[in-house]
Image (cartoon, rainbow, N blue to C red):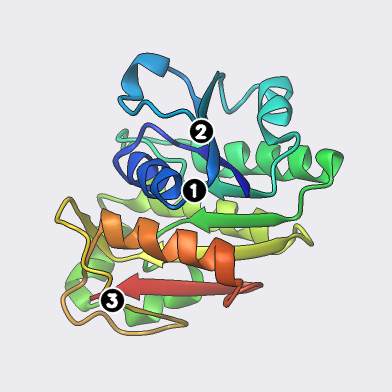
């Protein structure tokens, strides 16, 4: 199976690429700066491009079996990288007749807001307000796309090792409100293979 990963040089994106390659997938990594992709593999293809440039996005999507979107930014200011970037991906998928997409957003977006603790709600409403707004628009575009979509909403991401032990489902409560990026990647790759949560937005947490 051929996968294209957008946001491939982020911490979660690199974990997705690494685990996909280890499981035998042919992976295309869409990146702005190829020097940030530290992985090397015979089944890894790197495409340099900007997520706002539709032509480059369309080229990356062409011929793929599935798309994984883990777009993000460390900038807490006003941003549209997730929403506009995802809109470009969706358009490229439709023009290339690629139907399967798994998108990473965050626990607390849309109806999963009710699963957050009071402290986390305060955190989202203040420091992460711009990020949350971008994720909300991103999820809207995905849900209205008519593609075979799945939204994965991680709780607080950590750089701890893969455990393959986590809770995933709709509107679940987090016991620790933490999840390893490696486990998020594991769940995404499993979803691409199993198609358990098509047309569903699910939370993943410990």
Q: Residue at x 61, y 26 (%)?
A: 52
Give the vertical position of 13 relative to 154 (above or below): above
Give the vertical position of 145 relative to 80 (above or below): below
Secondary structure at numbered mark 3 = loop
Q: In this view, does 76 lie to the left or right of 46?
A: left
Would you say the residues marked 2 and 1 are in contact, meaning their CB atoms lie under 8 Å apart?
A: yes
Secondary structure at numbered mark 1 = loop
Packing grade of label 3 (10 A; few <14, some 14-19, many >=20) is some
Closer to us: 83 or 163: 163
Q: Residue at x 51, y 35 (%)?
A: 81
Q: Report the quarter where the C terminus lies.
A: bottom left
Would you say the residues marked 2 and 3 are in contact, meaning their CB atoms lie under 8 Å apart?
A: no
> What number is the disc on residue 24?
1
> What number is the disc on residue 43?
2
Would you say the residues marked 3 and 1 are in contact, meaning their CB atoms lie under 8 Å apart?
A: no
Secondary structure at numbered mark 2 = loop
Please name the residue that numbered disc 3 is placed on.
166
Q: In this view, does 120 lie to the left or right of 132?
A: left
- 2 or 1: tag closer to the N-terminus: 1
């Amino acid at each position: 199976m051929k996968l294209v990963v957008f946001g491939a040089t982020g911490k979660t994106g690199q974990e997705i690429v690494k685990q996909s390659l280890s499981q035998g997938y042919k992976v295309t990594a869409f990146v702005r700066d190829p020097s940030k992709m530290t992985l090397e593999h015979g089944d890894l293809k790197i495409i340099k491009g900007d997520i706002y440039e539709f032509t480059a996005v369309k080229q990356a999507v062409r011929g793929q079996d599935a798309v994984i979107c883990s777009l993000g930014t460390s900038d807490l200011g006003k941003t549209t990288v997730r929403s506009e970037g995802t809109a470009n991906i969706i358009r490229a998928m439709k023009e290339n007749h690629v139907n399967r997409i798994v998108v990473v957003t965050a626990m607390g977006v849309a109806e999963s807001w009710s699963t957050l603790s009071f402290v986390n709600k305060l955190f989202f409403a203040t420091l992460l307000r711009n990020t949350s707004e971008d994720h909300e628009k991103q999820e809207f575009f995905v849900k209205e796309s008519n593609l075979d979509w799945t939204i994965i909403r991680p709780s607080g991401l950590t750089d701890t090792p893969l455990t393959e032990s986590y809770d995933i489902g709709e509107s679940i409560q987090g016991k620790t409100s933490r999840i390893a990026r490696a486990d998020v990647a594991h769940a995404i790759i499993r979803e691409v293979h199993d198609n358990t949560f098509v047309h569903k937005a699910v939370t993943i947490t410990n």
